[in-house]
Amino acid sequence: MGLRHVPCVLLALAALFTIAAPTSGAQWSSIAPTDYRSTIEVSVDGKPLTYYRFDRESPIGFAVEGPTRVKLLVRLRLPMSADEGSCVFDVLRDGAAAQVETLSSYPSERAFYISFEDFRPSVIRRVYIDVPTGTHGYELSPRERCGAEARVFRSTGDSTSRVSFAPSEYAAAETFYYRDKELVYYLATRDRDVVLDVIGPTTVKVNSRLIYDHTMAKSQTYAFGVGRPGHDEMLYKVETEPSETVVFRDRDELIPSGLRHFMLEVPSGRHRYVFRVAYTLAPAIAFNFYVPRGDLSNEP
């Protein structure tokens, strides 16, 4: 599919904050289930993670105090010969039926069991449970004779704490000073894009600054495209001026512009976003990225 440029204008700073006001999101804290068949170590992109194995005879169970929300990251146990799998799960609250979840998935290319197994883990699927007020016991049990592993998380609040998230490719990294803080930005040039690999679902806060040299007029307009394979590219046009509070740490000949930002909604799964320079008189456009702290636990 070709890239179709769809205009999306980032307005002046005051209006920008109205458009891009932070959205609420959950932070997640892992909780250990009280009932399960066994634990199993799963390597995900080289990182070992402990999952809790369960089946029809030994469902996964846990207690949690509400009101809150629970998230289960579930991987089906697929035979080595299977290209896909599906299973129906019953969610019980205090022994009574609460909801039914049908999960279909396929073998993961980035996850495997560390111990020798005749099965392989699937790509994760998510189950969300809204917990009412009070302490409640939950069970997740497959109806059929299928097995799965899960990790369990509970929401710890609605205010979003964001952490810096580095891109995988860029032309250069530069450090800016803002008062007593250091800010790391990643540069895109006409010859080199910034590439961000991220696992959703999540919402990425994208900050951008134009890099001025001393030959440029104060008021500038720049544009950059944001695209991912198989989807239309979005073209962002930004008006800006030099920052009065942010400076380069090591380069006196360059000046960063005022901050502009927008929120990038990332769907489930692993995605690659390419930030390319579409138009500017400047030598580069600087980006940095922030994701909700709780979404760092996302898995492909």
Image: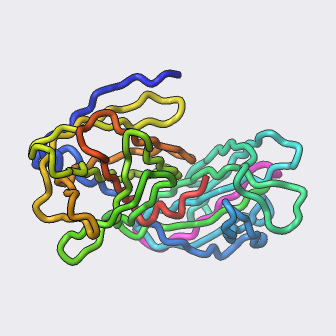
Residue drawn 71% across the image and 61% down it: 149
The picture places residue 166, in percent across and down from the top left corner, at: 45, 60
**Nearest the camera: 153 or 5?**
5
Residue drawn 64% across the image and 52% down it: 124
How did the renderer colour the structure? rainbow
Q: Is residue 217 above or below residue 97?
A: above
**Nearest the camera: 121 or 211?**
211
**In the displayed structure, does residue 176 sit left or right of residue 187?**
left
**Nearest the camera: 55 or 172?**
172
The main secondary structure of the magenta stretch is: strand
Total marks in image: 0
The picture places residue 138, in percent across and down from the top left corner, at: 59, 65
The picture places residue 239, in percent across and down from the top left corner, at: 16, 40
Q: Is residue 7 above or below residue 96?
A: above
Magenta run includes residue 60: no
**Magenta segment range?**
132-146
Residue 63 figure quarter: bottom right
**Nearest the camera: 280 or 137?**
280
Magenta run includes residue 133: yes
Q: Is residue 293 above or below residue 87?
A: below
Residue 155 figure quarter: bottom left
Residue drawn 67% across the image and 60% down it: 45
